[in-house]
């Protein structure tokens, strides 16, 4: 992105964990939170588009990529990441921003709203959820399956980690992730899916399982009715990971929300149809900026 200002940095969070961030562009701040075990690459079309007129801020969750793993894994949680996000704003002297969350990132935004609602100018959630998503994953309750996986890891951690990494490196991993509804192979660049798989592989399995369990335990049902900030909910109609029913429940609970369904959109609708998604988000931002002016 020639001519667009970019800077990187890190700060020390409440428990001493180092959190990495990037700032691209200038203007009204947009702070983007990705899905669990994902990478900032999941926002690449939005970064390119919005950094021309906005200040796009990205960060890595604790335990992910360029951020450190907390010394105490009890602090590998949704609540801890919410604190990281609040402290990121304080570190950058941001008094208000638009907070976007994809998938698990919606829980992070919910937690931020709970602890610091004054920071939230507006919200964008893409295929998000506010409570345990695997109870409805693929239309089934997948909690027992997770408990079995966790038990297998605790019994044979080295064997489980080897099998986990081998699975992610398998040629079948990419089509399996796509066919599950995570991506639309006809629309999403295969390189984006490969980056995702490499990102998942890079996270220690214990870190992943600890945060995944926190994600399952988190319930933002009491937060949603308190949200006064304008909220745009984007839903892929072919998303089997967090089906349309998840977005409809968010829409019903957040009184000041709008719901936009993306035709043929998978769980990563922002990668499937980036131009359409970007235009809808831009219109939403401009609408609520004009209302204030």
Image (cartoon, rainbow, N blue to C red):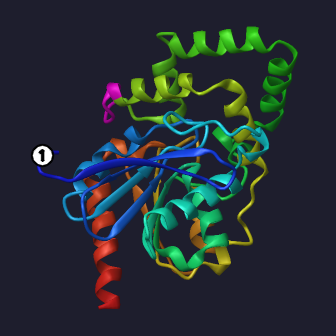
Q: Is residue 130 visible?
A: yes
Which residue does the image show at 44% across and 75% down from the upper left? 96
Drawn side of residue 152 relative to residue 37, left or right: right
Residue 281 location in percent, x, y?
Answer: 33, 64
Which residue is more in the foreground, 266 or 287? 287
* Magenta region, residue range: 186-191
Q: Please, what is the dominant secondary structure of the magenta stretch? A: loop
Q: Is residue 8 magenta?
A: no
Residue sitting nearer the eye, 148 or 176: 148
In the foreground, 231 or 9: 9
- The spot of residue 68 in percent (x, y) is 58, 37
The residue that appears at 47% across and 10% down in the rendered structure is 171
Looking at the rendering, which quadrant does residue 208 occupy? top right
Q: Position of residue 136 (x, y in %)?
A: 70, 46
Measured from the top left, where is residue 174 in percent x and y? 46, 20
Provide the residue designation for mark 1.
2
């Amino acid at each position: 992105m020639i001519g667009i200002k970019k800077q990187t940095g890190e700060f020390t969070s409440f428990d001493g964990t180092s959190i990495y961030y990037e700032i691209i562009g200038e203007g009204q701040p947009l702070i983007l939170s990705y899905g669990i075990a994902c990478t900032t690459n999941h926002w690449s079309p939005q970064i390119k588009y919005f950094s021309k007129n906005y200040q796009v801020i990205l960060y890595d969750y604790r335990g992910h990529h360029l951020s450190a793993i907390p010394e105490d894994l009890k602090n590998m949680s949704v609540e801890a990441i919410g604190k990281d996000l609040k402290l990121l704003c304080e570190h950058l002297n941001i008094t208000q921003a638009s907070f976007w969350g994809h998938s698990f990132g919606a829980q992070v935004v919910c937690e931020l709203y709970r602890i610091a609602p004054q920071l939230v100018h507006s919200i964008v959630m893409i295929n998000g959820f506010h409570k345990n998503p695997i109870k409805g994953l693929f239309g089934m309750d997948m909690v027992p399956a997770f408990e079995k996986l966790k038990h297998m890891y605790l019994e044979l951690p080295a064997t489980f980690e080897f099998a986990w990494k081998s699975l992610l490196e398998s040629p079948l991993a990419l089509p399996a992730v796509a066919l599950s509804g995570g991506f639309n192979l006809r629309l999403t660049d295969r390189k984006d899916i490969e980056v995702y798989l490499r990102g998942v592989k890079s996270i220690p399995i214990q870190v992943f399982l600890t945060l995944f369990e926190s994600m399952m335990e988190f319930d933002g049902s009491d937060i949603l009715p308190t949200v006064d900030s304008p909220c745009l909910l984007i839903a892929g109609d072919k998303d089997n990971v967090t089906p349309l029913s998840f977005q409809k429940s968010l829409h019903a609970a957040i009184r000041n929300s709008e719901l936009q369904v993306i035709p043929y959109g998978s769980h990563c609708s922002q990668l499937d149809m980036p131009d359409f998604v970007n235009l809808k988000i831009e219109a939403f931002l401009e609408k609520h900026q004009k209302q204030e002016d």
